[in-house]
Structures are given as structure tokens and as C-alpha cells.
Image: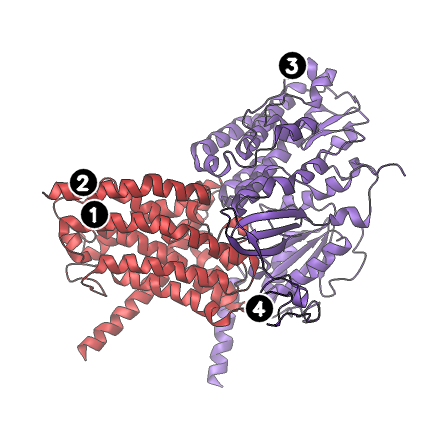
Amino acid sequence: MAGAGTGVGVRRVLAGLAGRAPARVFVVAGRDARESVQGLRLDPRLEFVDSPRAAAILLVVGDLPEPLLAAGLALHDSMPRPRATVWWIPASGGPKRSDFPGALVVRAGEDVAAAISRTQAALLLGRRASEPDLLPDTDPAPWRGVGPYGQGGTGMTGGVPYGRPLAERAPDRDGLELDQLPVGVGPFFPPFPPGFVLEAKLQGDVIQAAALGENAFARTEPRGDTMAAVSGPFARALTQPVLITELELARARHHLAWLGHALRVQGLGALGRRAWRLASGISPVRAQEVRVFSRMLEATRSLGWATASVGVIDTALLAQMAPGPVTRAAGSARDAREEDPAYIALGFESVVQPDGDARARWRQRVDEALQSLQLAGQAGERLSTPVGKIESPRGTLTDAVSPAAELLDLVPALVTGMEWGDAMTTIVSLDLDLEEAAGRPVPAA
Amino acid sequence: MSETLGLLVGVALTIVVVGAGAYLVGVIDAAIAQVVAGEALEWNRTLAAPVRGAAFLLLQERTTTERPDAPLWAIAPALLAGLAATALALVPLGPSGAVAEVEAGIVAFGALGALVMVAVYFHGWAPNSVLPLIGGYRFVALALSYEMPLALVLIAAALPAQSLRLSAIVASQAELWNVLRQPLGLPLYLIAGLGLAFRGPLAFPDAADLAGGTRAEASGAALLLWQTARSAMLVAVAAIGATVFLGGWLGPWLPGPAWLAVKTLVLLVPLVAADHLLARVRLERFVVIAWVVLIPLALVDVFLSGVLLL
């Protein structure tokens, strides 16, 4: 009895301490969720963790298309107890289904960080019950072993018993026959954009073959128009004049938010927070802070070591692509703003980097962010001119071309043969977005 | 009887140092992270953060994966913690020696380093999951490249002492610290030390690009033990570095252990800061740099140290 009493006492002390820690959150971001999640990143009440195993709160944002929902439910069940789900609907309305039965639903206008923080404290203090599994704990497929050792294939390797592919043999880069493991990573792997699934064949940490998984955003609600999924004022600017200041500040914010993410994937979370802080308070008068930050990144040279000569794109491919930060980072000066009289009047000239590698891409985005701040400071009340195309942060958008989809298509060939770390650096450097890519124009039937 | 008592006191002291060291690393880490992020330093939160985080993990369930190698998964954090504790026990605290006064202390430390690879690979292999496995592979690919310079600079430091005993190496620095006598030694040691504690630019197995790598599937008390062990290993790297290159407990006015603590802290702060300021290097590139630059420099260090003794 005394032992049990002490146990309860210890538990209460621990809960009192842990209840004051930031809530550990794993994010499952659905449609139109990116900007909302970005707004929470700096909240001191929250700590965004990279693995569901380290989280107590599963934060589901927006509605999840069908294949992402299945992944979200599986992630929920992989979380350790005590656990809870907070389902945040940043747009108006409520959840369309009840896929996360125990979830606390937070609607637009409510303080989601406070709700998450309260939920974790209640969980730890035992005032809120931990959620049970949402999926049955069974093997995903029946046993299909056929070989003499109970494996799936005919030799010692290969096959898919229990629905899990086994390792196969294949020559490695030195010509040796070694195990090759087929793996799928995504759709909520933190270095990747939400929904991105990489189907890879790995030998050690080398990617020997790569393919993209299905784009869940494209499957459920095919969007005929490219623009709906493009965030910020850029879609609007395609058809109507928009304040140049507004466009350029949105661009600078986008690039700095990307930089924060890229730094985090390189293991530099604290520098990443600094980038996010700059992004959230973006204004032309803060250009100097961005410049200082950029110099700081150049001074810690190892960011250059991690990205230099990684992920160089074939020049023939680049020539066919829509212009954007990725092509400009490889020396091509094309930029849709050069054709807009309003920008010409401001003396706009595109900036470029010569190298075309991942390092050139992050330098390019920092330079473009600085240029955007300068333009935003000069533009005053000037409006952009709709010329049938617009330079979005991912590249030149027209009614027919989505740069995001083009960038996505580059991935399999680029990462094949790379070590895991280089592949992650490359994928991040392209600034992919599955929702925007899903807006790829549908060919006329 | 007194020997048993001494042993118990030594073990208790080591466990306290492991816990306190991990706490200290947590506090320094949180403080540096806030400064680097450009945020106001909140001391109350910074000092409480490691304790609150530990309490959170103690309340969390330890999850499992599909068909893990359960014994290895349980052993891995315990092995790493044991190695860190053993390394800390080797550090001489004063003229009377270390908790574990070993004849060839410096060799023992090098041998521990080799076993870290085993602990990390177990931790990556055991969960039967992709991301931890890649983390494990990476560490195996990396290990030899940092262990070679580590072993060589430690041998160079043993030369002037003409002994492999850590106490003798401290005593040999009474006139001149090894950091000045062997200027190549400490920088090479710190690079290799980051590899041994797999942090900062050499945080390959537990990297952010693997969503935590070998610890991606770990939770609860097992994760707490792993993180504590990893931090304690960094403290051990700093403490052995202070002993071998900064004269260990030697110094005027203050008692020996206080000098050792100060010198350990001097090395610990930059080691922790590396986590926040230096990006992870590319694995392939690091291996090339290690074999083309670091190992030859370590050999030069050994050679020059030998020549100076003639």
C-alpha cells in the first residue's frame, strides 16, 4: 500500500514538472494547412518534434485527403501513451468527418497553442484519458511466404511476406552484390513537404533507385486551375493589379520561412528559428537584420560544406523548366518580373548564382529575399501589371505551367545514387509543394 | 571492507556526475539555442528545461515496433550510459587519482570509443525500422575516420608523460600544458570528440534529416536514458580533453576537482555550441577529410611529440 502511495506521489511530482514543459507536438498537415502551421512554429508553449514517438499531441491541421488520412491514423497509433489529438480547422467550418473520434476540435479564431498546451497538461496529470488505438493491431497483409525458409521469394531474399517487401540483391556502386532494401518514406516525414512520399531502394544509406509516391492532393479533389493552391497574393496578381509591396514582402517571407526549414533539416534548429523570426516580422526596414543573418550563415562555413556541389541539375533539363529560384541559382537570368512595366520602372534586374547546386539555391533565395525587401521599400503604392504570368516564390506561373509540378518531377533522377543526407539536402533545396503541384493543369479531354 | 565502501562511493559519485553532467549539457544547450535563435535568454525556463523534459519522458510509455530485436534495443542505451560512466570514472580528480585508477587509462578511453560504435549500431538496428537503421549504418561508416585521429593524438599526449596512466599525463603537464606543447592535439581531439558523442557536424546517426535517426522510434524512459548517455559522453569527452590537454586538476588556489570542473566547462561550451552553429558535414566528404587531412596531421602530432623528447 505504502509503495502504491509513493508511486502516486512520485507520479504527481513528475506530472507537475512535465506539465510545465512545452507541449510536444507532431504535425499532420492536410489541405491549406501550411501557412497556419508556420504561424505556430515560434510559439514558446509548443515544441515541434520530428518523430511521433517523441510527441504527446498529434496536431491534425485541416482536412486530410484519403491516403493521408490512413497515414495520419497509423501515426496516431504509433504515439506513446499518454497521447491526444488536437484537430485544428484554421478555415471556417468544422471537420467533415469524425476520423479522429477522441480529438479536441479547435476552430478558426481560437487559441490553438493554448488548447494544445492545456491538453498535454491534462493528459500528464491524468485529467484527460489517453486515446486508444484507432486502427486494429494486425498485420497489414496475410502471410504469403513461399520460399523454402518461409520467406516471400524463391531465393534467400525478396518477396513481400506480410505485405512488407524484403531486401533483394543488387550490385552496389563498387560492383559488389549487396542487399537492397525497398523503403517508403513519407507522407509526414518532417524534412519533406506534407504528402510527399519517396519510394526508394536503399543500399546502406545510398539511394539506388527512387520514385515518387502518389500525390494525395491530386487524387481526391483534382483542381483544374493551377492557382487555387498557390498561397499568398500571387494567384491574384495573375489577373489583377496587386501592390508590389505586398507581393515582394510575401516573397521575402516565403523564402525566409523556407530557409528556416532548410536549416532545421541540416540540424540547425536554433538558426532556423532565427530565420522564422525574420520571416514573421518581415518589413523593408529589417533588411539589415536579414543581411546580418546571411553573413552569419556564410561565416559558419559548414553549411556550405553540407550543400556545395550537391544536387546539380542537368543543364538540358534546366533549359526546359519554367524560370524560378532554382533555374536562377544555375545562372539563368529569366524572371517574369522583367516583363512587368511596373517592375521595369523600379529598375528591377534579376539576381543569379552561377553554381547550380543546393548551396547556390539557398544563397539565391536569401538574395531574392533581400532584393524583395528593397523593392518593397521602393515601390510605395505602385501596382503590378498583369502580363499573363507572375513570378511566384517557386517560379514563373502562367495559366498553363506550374513550376511546383516541374520541380517535383526532377526528384527521382536527381536523388538516385545519392547518400541519404545529400538526397535530403537536394529535396529540401527544391522547395517542393505537393498541393501546388497537384494544381497542375488538367489536359483538355 | 573499506575497499568495498570506496567502490560504492566511487560508483555513486560516477552516477551523480553522469546525471549532473547531462543536466549541465541540457542547460548549456538550451541557453545557446536561445542566443543563436536571437531570443531573450529566460534563465528560469533554461534551468528547468532539462528536468521538465526528463519528467515528461518518465511519464511516457515505452513503445515498441513491429518485430524489434528487443534485447539489443534494451541494451543499447544502457551500454552507451555505461561507457560514458566508465569514461568519466577514468578522469583523475586530484593527486589521489581517479574513481577508476587504471594503469593504461588512456588506452581504456580509446577502447571505450570503439564500443560506442557497437551501442549506436545496436540502437539503430534493434527497432527494425528504416530511419534508425540508416542512422546505424552511417555511424559504422563514420567511426573509423574519427577513431584513428583520436587514438593518435592520445598516444602523442602519453609520450611526454612516458606513461599511459592519465594521472601521469596530468603530472607531466605541471610545467607546460599539452595544449601548448602539442598545438595540433586539442583541435584534432575536439573534432574526434564530436564524432564520439555524435553531435554537431558529426551528428550522423541521430540526425534531423532522419527525424532523429537511431532514436526516431524510441520513447519514454529508454529515450531519456539514451539522451542522458549521449550528453554524459560529451561531458566525458570534455573531461578527458581537459585532463589530457589542459592540465586536468592542476592549478593554484582552487582545489583540484574545481580546476577540473572549470576546464571541462571551457571545452564543453564550444562542443555544445557546435550543435547549433555548424551544419552536419557530408558523410563522404568527412571520411575523405579524415583520411587525407586529420589522420596525417595526427601522425605529424605524434612525430613532433616524439622529436621534442629526444
Q: Which residue is mark 1?
A: B156
Query: How far apart are labels 2 and 3 at the CA level?
Result: 61 Å
Assign a secondary structure to mark 2. Answer: helix
Q: The residue under label 4 is which amino acid type? A: Leu
Give the percent coordinates (x, y) of residue A85.
67, 61
Query: How far apart are labels 2 and 4 at the CA level?
Result: 62 Å
Chain A, colour shown: purple
Q: Mark 4 vs mark 3: which is more N-terminal?
A: 4
Subunit under mark 2: B
Q: Determine if marks 2 and 4 fall on one subunit.
A: no
Could you tell me which residue is drawn at 78 percent across and 35 percent down?
A: A227
Q: Determine if marks 1 and 2 fall on one subunit.
A: yes
Could you tell me which residue is drawn at 49 percent across and 80 percent down?
A: A5
Q: The residue under label 2 is which amino acid type? A: Leu
- Quarter of the view holding residue A433: top right
| Viewer-nearest residue: B104 or A24 | B104
Residue A281 in sight in this render = no
Query: How far apart are labels 3 and 1 at the CA level?
Result: 62 Å
Q: Which residue is mark 3?
A: A347
Q: Which residue is mark 4?
A: A125
Of badges 2 and 3, the one in the foreground is 2
Give the percent coordinates (x, y) of residue A94.
79, 54
Specify the chain shown as red: B
For the residues bearing labels 1 and 2, Cβ distance under 8 angstroms: yes
Label for residue B304? 2
Query: How far apart are labels 4 and 3 at the CA level?
Result: 61 Å
Residue lying furthest bottom: A1
